[in-house]
Image (tube, helix red, strand yellow):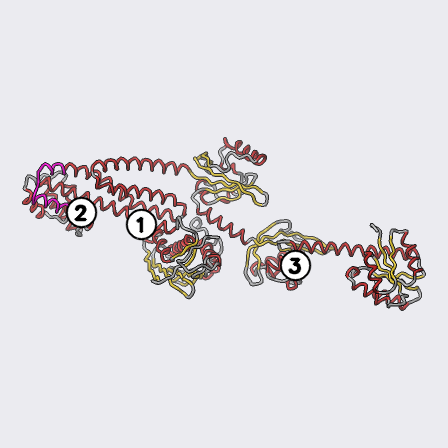
Amino acid sequence: MGDRGVILVVSDDARAAGELRDLLGVDAYDVVHAPGDLERSTQALAAAPDLIVVDVGLERADPFELAADLHHAGRARDLPVVFLVAESDVERRVRGLQVGDDLISTPLDPHEALARVQRQVTISRSRAARRESEAKFRSVMESAIDAIISTDADGVIRSWNSAAADLFGHPEEEAVGRTLDLIIPERFRKRHRTAIERVSHGGPTNLIGRTVEFAGLRSDGTEFPIELALSTWFLDADRYYTGIIRDISDRVRAEERFRSVTDSAVDAIISADHTGRIVSWNPAATRILGHSEADALGRSLELVIPARYREQHRAGMARYAATGEAHVIGTTVELEALTASGAEIPVELSLSTWTVGGDRYYTGIIRDLAERRAAEAALRRSEEEFRAKEAEFRARNAALEETIQRINSMQDQLLLQEKMASIGRLSAGMAHEMNNPASAAQRGAAQASEVFARLQEAQIELGRLGLYGSRLDKLRELDALAARRARDPVELGAVERSDREAEVEDWLERYDVRSGGDLAASIVNLGVTRDGLDELGMVFGDERLPVVVEWLGLKSAIYALLSEIVVGTNRIVELVRALKMYTYMDQTPVQDVDVRTGLDDTLVILHNKLKHGVRVVREFDADLPLIQAYASELNQVWTNLIDNAIDAMGGQGTLTLRARRAGDRVEVQVEDDGPGVPADIRSKLFDLFFTTKAPGEGTGLGLAISRNIIVKKHGGEFDLESRDGCTRFTARLPIGVAPDGETGAPAGAMQQEEG
């Protein structure tokens, strides 16, 4: 039937039906006639009529009940019903107006009948269009993966899709009719009501047309980060709002992880959009290039590009946008960067590109080559000097080869420590701890070279004396004494040592022993007194005695220097071992972990901060079970808590560490005797970026990240107790359960890979 309107006429009077067909057919309507019984009238609905006309003069059915029955049929539910009734039949006219939509009087007036039919057909088609529109809208609402919520001007919810029910935990029937306070955290509700009041009085709608980030409230009372896109529309004169809401918890966590990485990086990390505008800027970029984050964000990358390179930079950006041809992306190049002071510095740049929502971004990692080149030059000089000394030692005495190998090992370990300096704030303390034993070993090696040269000469002269028998045995005895005293020197008070050295020095001068003043301390370290020297004269004779005593002093000195080198290199080995265990290098992310080892290694790493006045008390259970965990991330938690405790005590006080079993969990406590956390900030202590430290000394991320690692990543608990003189952080970690909620095998039986 095409676009022509369809009129269903239900009548037992064929003449009346024909008269309507003749009247309406000339005005683009098709008339379908059905006798006045329910079955055939229902069958006639297959013609998809726009209007039903019921003759009140039906013989086999009540016309008003028949109209009601037709309305109950699915396809006729919203169709208008017009009753055909005589002008004089007042009772039926009233009944028709009560249960129907309109009346057509008989005998027919063509103009009146046509006008009434046209009006009802228009209403019918309008209803159909509205039903179709509502169905499409509902389909879009229910197929959307984001929550879609509409409210009136008072903030009362009018529509609520299934995604909103899944996101917030409230079913549609519970949400519709309530205010938006249902999903707004308590601390934001006053601001929300103020905004509604402002807009209702004609004020600006600050959020319309923008995408903003807020916090949402679930039915269980938990808050989570959301992204909101808000629009407004009008129905007649009434204002309505529609918001599209997306859960951005994963994105926020990813941004937090990205921020923690970039903030701890020693290299500058800068990101820019496709126009070259800076969108991220880490602390290392401020340190290297001089611009603060606030000053850099939103500005062009040309901020750090010397003027002579800017045209080349613009051409490269345009070429890559047009052709995808990249000369620098994916490679590492050396060039110059412009600092805030206007100076140029040599840098190494690694550039990559990535896309979000179809938009292209660039990220560059910038390393200050001035520092590295200076370090490389210093390292080359150090290596050259060391190799020269190594060759000299090998030529003179094979016994020193082991020491040289240890120094080589020390150098390798120092290089490893230098590479691991990217662990952030721990690097300065570790460098200081490494420097002391390294310097001691270097000084000992340099002095040993000089002493060994003199010892060689004394050896030659001693050989010319031709000693044998008891005298040779005595030399062996003196050599053993020198080796033993290097490990276990004689303990003397300052005054007694000074007196003995003066006596020995006088004795050496009397016998014309070369460099007697230098050898006096070495001979006293052996426990040999002036009387002991006189006894040696009785064994070797006066003519041989100066040579023997000089040889003995040099032997004592060389053994002492070798002992000093051994102590220094052993300390370096201990530090490197602790750092390697701390970072869990070359090990799987999820593994069997003894938290006591992690705490001990963290104390070694933070020794530089502890040694100035912090007393450490360990209360560790001897039979503590292993747990499955991300070991290096747990060490990050211990570092944050111990470092904060040291700062809270001002570097002096008692730090208590506990590790014990608590039911099905391992409990770790870090406690200090500082002034405690003020009550008014305890609720904020775990908020991102909240810190009580001075600007530049704290990021406000440590405790938030620590709680996230314990609670979310390991399924544990993280608590704080604080009062004056006692602040205690407690972490409880599950036993026998792998991170991320996966049940693991008993500790020691397997290791989980990070999923």
Q: Mark 2 and mark 1: span between their CA atoms?
A: 24 Å
Q: Which of marks 1 and 3 is in front?
A: 1
Task: Say which amino acid is labelled 3.
Answer: Trp
Most common secondary structure along the magenta stretch: helix
- Residue neighbourhood size for the residue with mark 3, other residues' Cα within 10 Å, grouped as few (<14), some (14–19), many (≥20): many
Numbered disc total: 3
Question: Can see residue 327?
Answer: yes
Of callouts 1 and 3, the N-terminal one: 3
Which residue is rendered at x = 46% and y = 35% of the image? 333
Which residue is rendered at x = 52% and y = 34% of the image? 313
Examine the structure image and report whether residue 639 is included in the region drawn in magenta.
Answer: no
Of callouts 2 and 1, the N-terminal one: 2
Tell me which corner region of the image, top left, top right, bottom left or bottom right, holds residue 722. Answer: bottom left
* Coordinates of residue 221 in the picture (x, y in percent): 55, 62
Task: Say which amino acid is labelled 1.
Answer: Glu
Element carrying mark 3:
strand
Mark 1, residue position:
574
Of callouts 2 and 3, the N-terminal one: 3
Q: Bounds of the magenta span?
A: 458-479
Q: Residue 535 carries which label?
A: none
Mark 3, residue position:
160
Question: Can see residue 725?
Answer: no
* Coordinates of residue 388 in the picture (x, y in percent): 26, 35
Tell me which corner region of the image, top left, top right, bottom left or bottom right, holds residue 318. Answer: top right
Q: In the rendered view, would you say 398 is above or below 732?
A: above
Q: Which mark is residue 483?
A: 2
- Residue neighbourhood size for the residue with mark 1, other residues' Cα within 10 Å, grouped as few (<14), some (14–19), many (≥20): few
Task: Say which amino acid is labelled 2.
Answer: Ala
User: Which residue is more in the foreground, 339 or 740?
Assistant: 740
